[in-house]
Image: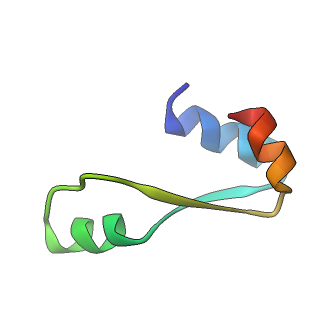
């Protein structure tokens, strides 16, 4: 399952998935992104674990 599919499933459950951290900085600076950190809001961690 790719991140877009995960984001859609989270949204279907009432949550939102955000890309956060250094990946945002690197994108803005035109650097290569080596890792991505995500934050989920609006749903419980139990629902997130069921999705992923």
Using residue 28 as the reference point, say whether residue 45 is left or right of it: right
**Quadrant position of residue 44:** bottom right
Using residue 35 as the reference point, say whether residue 32 is left or right of it: left
Q: Residue at x 68, y 34 (%)?
A: 52
Task: Judge whether 13 appears above or below 43 on screen.
Answer: above
**Quadrant position of residue 10:** top right
Across the whole image, how many numbered discs are drawn on residues? Answer: 0
Task: Judge whether 16 appears above or below 22 on screen.
Answer: above
Residue 51 seen in render:
yes
Residue 13 seen in render:
no
Using residue 30 as the reference point, say whether residue 27 is left or right of it: right
Residue 19: x and y in percent read 48, 61
Q: Residue at x 23, y 68 (%)?
A: 26
Q: Residue at x 84, y 57 (%)?
A: 43
Residue 50: x and y in percent read 80, 34
Residue 47: x and y in percent read 84, 44
Task: Judge whether 44 appears above or below 50 on screen.
Answer: below
């Amino acid at each position: 399952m790719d991140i877009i599919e995960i984001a859609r499933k989270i949204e279907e459950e009432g949550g939102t998935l955000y890309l956060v951290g250094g990946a945002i900085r690197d994108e803005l600076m035109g650097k290569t992104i080596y890792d991505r950190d995500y934050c989920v809001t609006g749903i419980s961690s139990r629902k997130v674990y069921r999705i992923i």
